[in-house]
Amino acid sequence: MTEIAEEIAQVRFTVESARARRQSIGFVPTMGALHAGHARLIERCREEARFTVVSLFVNPTQFGPNEDFTSYPRTWDEDLCVASAAGADLLFRPSVEAMYPSGRLSTYVEPGSLSTVLEGRSRPGHFRGVATVVLKLFQIVQPDFAYFGEKDYQQLLVIRRIVDDLNVPVAVRSVPTVREPDGLAMSSRNRYLSPAERQAALVLSRALGAARDVVLRGEHDANRIRQTLAETVKYEQLAELDYAEVADAGSLEPLVEIETGRRAVALLAVRIGGTRLIDNAILME
Ligand code: AMP
């Protein structure tokens, strides 16, 4: 049985009870509109932690003024089914008022240089919102383990950095991106896509595949790999490139050359009609 909590006090009480039973606590933060990617995170959590907490919270502070906070899909009934089937013990679904009682906070977490590039440049304030809400959720749930998807690669690095910098006593685990059979990375925002846009959205995984192929064929010049990414996207009429980057997989510093022994990642953000999608792939382990 999955317990549902809307109040912070109930979460604290239930988690404390689990701890009193000597159960370890795992945590999967989400914005709801759950899909198989989220389910995989919950399953991973179940494998490692004895008690699994999942939060569903569409966090207003991580959306820009012209972004999709209001239209973001809210599918509570289905979310409950997905989370229960995946094995969640506790679903935390706070209201905006519960998380931001007087409408706003006077304290925010400001992540450093990892958060000012790529997504951070395209979405100013986004990672400050993410960092703050994740730290708040960590303080409420106090998990031993927390699970994040590699799909949001930069977010994963930002969270790891906050946990290190602020000595948060949680082990951050990353989970590989879950994809549709045709390669599209699962995302709650895929629901926005029309059938034609859904087809066009394949350009992200296709471009990353092309980048991986040129690296496998010996291309190490990062600019030429960026060009491969950008040109693949350009070829798709419904797609508009936001960024195509080849970066150090730990620092996100843009690379000049791909080198053996230095992990490298390709990161893409593309607009398909009104929908902005991101994806990434490791180019060098
Ligand atoms: P969201 O609800 O989009 O904020 O995502 C909640 C968590 O699920 C984040 O850690 C995401 O990185 C992760 N996630 C989203 N989509 C996927 C996916 N396709 N595969 C794996 N993890 C994902």
Image: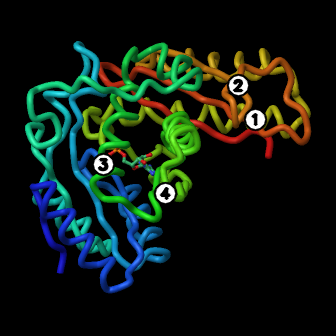
- Give the color scheme: rainbow, by chain, secondary structure or one colour: rainbow
Q: Are marks 3 and 2 in contact (CB under 8 Å)?
A: no
Instruction: Check disc 1 and report its element: helix, strand or loop.
Output: strand
Residue count near mark 4 (Cα–Cα under 10 Å), binned few <14, some 14–19, many ≥20: some
Give whichever of 47, 264 is nearer the camera: 47
Instruction: Check disc 3 and report its element: helix, strand or loop.
Output: helix
Q: Is residue 246 left or right of residue 40?
A: right
The quarter in which the N terminus is drawn is: bottom left
Mark 1 or mark 2: name the one nearer the start of the chain. 2
| Residue 170's disc number | 4
Mark 1 or mark 3: name the one nearer the start of the chain. 3
Rendered location of residue 259, percent (x, y): 89, 32
Residue count near mark 1 (Cα–Cα under 10 Å), binned few <14, some 14–19, many ≥20: many
- Farthest residue, direction bottom: 21
Q: Amino acid at mark 3?
A: Leu
Residue designated by label 2? 246
Q: Is residue 193 left or right of residue 261?
A: left
Q: CA distance from mark 1 to mark 2?
A: 7 Å
Q: Amino acid at mark 1?
A: Ala
Q: Are marks 1 and 3 in contact (CB under 8 Å)?
A: no
Mark 4 or mark 1: name the one nearer the start of the chain. 4
Q: Is residue 21 above or below residue 183?
A: below
Residue count near mark 2 (Cα–Cα under 10 Å), binned few <14, some 14–19, many ≥20: many
Q: Amino acid at mark 4?
A: Val
Residue designated by label 1? 264
Q: Amino acid at mark 2?
A: Val
Mark 4 or mark 2: name the one nearer the start of the chain. 4
